[in-house]
Image (tube, rainbow, N blue to C red):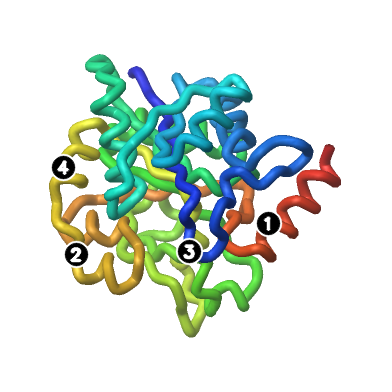
Amino acid sequence: MKTLIIIPSRLSATRLPGKPLLKINGLSIISHVVKRAQEAEIGEVFVAAEDQEIIEEVNKNGGQAILTHKQHKSGTDRIYEALEKLSKPDIDLIINLQGDEPLMSKEDIKNLHDQMIKTKSNFGTLATIIKKKKILSEQSVVKVITRESFKNSQFPEAVSFIRTSDEKSENIYHHLGIYCYKVETLKKFVSLQQSKNEIKNKLEQLRALDNNMKINVALAKDSPLGVDTKEDFVAIKKIMEYKS
């Protein structure tokens, strides 16, 4: 099977504008994400961006990028435009890797990809075990509830995605910013209207569940921080600079 990794990116994030170009160890966040994606060795990697500055930054660091328009309602819609512009008819799977996840493990990316192929799934994502109870009430950390626990299934089905929860149930996990879909599944997803649930919770994956599209979830070994706020950036910068 042939796979493309596409990373949506834009400068106008509400909480932390300009975050793709923030530097850690002399390299921008978006270029760190590209590097992680390339290290997974799954397929070609492209950044889909609405800003010329991001395109130039990615190209300067040896990556590939494609300019998309600014009117997209979600990252997935941006990815589909990039896919159409790339016109690669022989692609089977698309991985949508968020541009603010510089700590995403290449092993976890590979695991999601392997599960998709092994189970012939249409739509998949990653989650990790919640180790701190306070995460349950943190709005910025998205949670996924699965039909079965990972003890009983390697690729259980997602029942819901939520931002806050009062109590720890056995099947609630920390959702990670990565998706994998068959090309026809991606095409169907972007043809659907945004659902009320999606708009209310600002979670595009709810559009899929609200339209009876099944999403399977693989367990990630790592629990990487995403860059959502200035505090996240400072924390990730410390981790990455310490590691190097």
The answer to whether 77 is drawn above or below residue 12 in the figure is above
Looking at marks 4 and 1 on the same chain, the residue that comes earlier in the sequence is marked by 4
Cα gap from disc 2 to disc 4, whole angstroms: 14 Å
Cα gap from disc 4 to disc 1, whole angstroms: 34 Å
Residue 181 coordinates in the image, percent (x, y): 31, 37
Looking at marks 2 and 4 on the same chain, the residue that comes earlier in the sequence is marked by 4
How crowded pointer 2 is (Cα within 10 Å; few <14, some 14-19, many 20+) is rated as some
Residue denoted by label 2: 195
Q: Mark 1: which secondary structure? A: helix
Residue 102 coordinates in the image, percent (x, y): 62, 43
Front label number (1 vs 3)? 3
Residue 19 coordinates in the image, percent (x, y): 58, 51
Identified at 45% across, 20% down, the residue is: 44
- What amino acid type is highlighted by mark number 2? Ser
How crowded pointer 3 is (Cα within 10 Å; few <14, some 14-19, many 20+) is rated as few
Looking at marks 3 and 4 on the same chain, the residue that comes earlier in the sequence is marked by 3
